[in-house]
Amino acid sequence: MLYKGTVHKVGDHIDTDAIIPAVYLVTGDPKILGAKCMAGLDPDWVKQVKPGDILVAGRNFGCGSSREHAPIAILGAGIPVVVGHSFARIVYRNASNTGLMLFELGDAVNDIQDGDTLEINTETGTITDVTSGKSWSCPPIPASMAAIVSKGGLVNYVKARLGAN
């Protein structure tokens, strides 16, 4: 898969309550959650996002509680992929369960600026900042994970597998 979008950059230690504050956890609807994505940082943050844009995060993104609502809110905002310095362990499971792609890039995220255009090739693990011309490599998404993401998350993947049998 190839993703290309405008960068929306956030800092270090962005927890799940910043991604989607607890007051909005009365639903699992991606559109409703997406409309409040990052409301814990800035209530108007999501108004800048267009479908296909890319979130770039600092260290320990997704720390906090183990709510799946956080990746659902990111997806609901139209963001299919997050590039981060590092991720909290719990967010990996929740992201894969919901179909959100995560790429860990370490200190290289410091070279990516808010508003840049990124291009991400999930099969090769190549991330290119089209704006600056810089390019980085990280592990590509394993085929098993790509299959889950292509179905929109683990539940849909399992439904498709069971339906095929």
Image: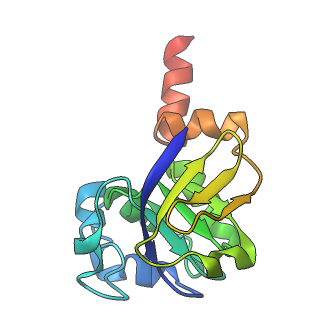
Foreground of the two, 102 or 131? 131
Quarter of the image where the N terminus is located: top right
Foreground of the two, 133 or 121? 133
29 above or below 107?
above
- The residue lying at 59 percent from left, 87 percent from top is 13
Outermost residue on the front side: it is 133
Query: Could one spot residue 29 in this view of the protein?
Result: no
- 38 horizontally vs 61: left or right: left
Image coords of residue 16 (percent x, y): 49, 78
134 above or below 11?
above
> Residue 41, located in which quarter of the rendered image?
bottom left
Image coords of residue 53 (percent x, y): 39, 60
Quarter of the image where the C terminus is located: top right
Image coords of residue 93 (percent x, y): 63, 58
- The residue lying at 73 percent from left, 74 percent from top is 106
Query: Could one spot residue 99 in this view of the protein?
Result: yes
154 above or below 44?
above
- 109 horizontally vs 160: left or right: right
- 144 horizontally vs 132: left or right: right
> Residue 123, located in which quarter of the rendered image?
top right
Foreground of the two, 26 or 19? 19
